[in-house]
């Protein structure tokens, strides 16, 4: 066993020595002269590009859908509860006041808001509030989906349920 290890080590060392002994190839004596570029055609003085229904190839395709709430709309979200998104909403607590249930919810900004049944969110409406969950009727903005609304339950102890 030790003899084979010794042979392997000697073989590797001889390979390293052979690589170090090689001399680098000499550099070429002179570089060839650069070839001049042919003259590029220039458009006529009164030329004007007409897209004729084609898209501009230099405009990014990202966030260019027909969605009414694109990236520009995200920057213009309303303040408060009306700007909260269903998927980013977190239920912090529920309470009963004057026979009606209220919920304390937090958004991505970390602020707490008090909501009631019927309050409008950015992409839905709060349908009902119970002691354990907030039920939201979310508007589905998918042109391929047959249903235009779905029910999302946000539980007090974490987790979501989509129906």
Image (cartoon, rainbow, N blue to C red):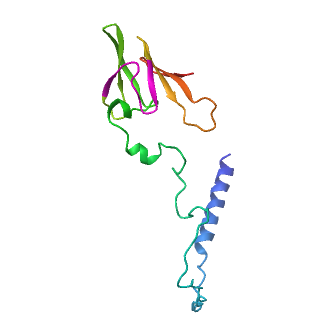
Give the x, y percent position of residue 55: 58, 61
8 relative to 136 in the view: left or right: right
Q: Nearer the viewer, residue 22 or 152?
A: 152
Q: Quadrant of residue 49?
A: bottom right
Residue at the far top in the pictured view: 99
Q: Quadrant of residue 39?
A: bottom right
Give the x, y percent position of residue 136: 47, 23
Up/down of 13 relative to 29, above or below: above
124 relative to 15 in the view: left or right: left
Up/down of 109 relative to 74, above or below: above
Give the x, y percent position of residue 74: 41, 43
Q: Quadrant of the C terminus?
A: top right
Give the x, y percent position of residue 65: 55, 48
Up/down of 136 relative to 53, above or below: above
Q: Residue at x 69, y 51 (%)?
A: 4
Up/down of 33 relative to 106, above or below: below
Q: Nearer the viewer, residue 120 or 5?
A: 120
Q: Which residues are magenta?
A: 112-127
Q: Residue at x 64, y 65 (%)?
A: 15
Taking the magenta stretch, the answer to whether it contains residue 116 is yes
Q: Residue at x 63, y 60 (%)?
A: 12
């Amino acid at each position: 066993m030790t003899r084979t290890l010794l042979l392997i080590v000697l073989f590797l060392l001889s390979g390293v020595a052979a690589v170090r002994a090689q001399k680098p190839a000499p550099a070429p004596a002179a570089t060839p002269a650069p070839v001049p570029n042919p003259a590029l055609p220039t458009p006529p003085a009164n030329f004007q590009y007409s897209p004729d229904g084609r898209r501009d190839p230099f405009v990014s395709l990202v966030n260019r859908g027909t969605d009414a709430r694109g990236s520009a709309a995200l920057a213009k979200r309303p303040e408060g509860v009306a700007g909260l998104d269903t998927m980013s909403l977190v239920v912090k607590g529920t309470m009963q006041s004057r026979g009606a249930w209220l919920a304390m919810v937090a958004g991505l900004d970390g602020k707490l808001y008090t909501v009631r049944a019927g309050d409008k969110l950015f992409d839905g409406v709060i349908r009902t509030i119970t002691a354990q969950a907030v039920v939201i009727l979310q508007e589905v903005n998918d042109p391929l989906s047959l249903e235009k609304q779905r029910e999302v339950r946000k539980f007090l102890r974490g987790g979501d349920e989509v129906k």
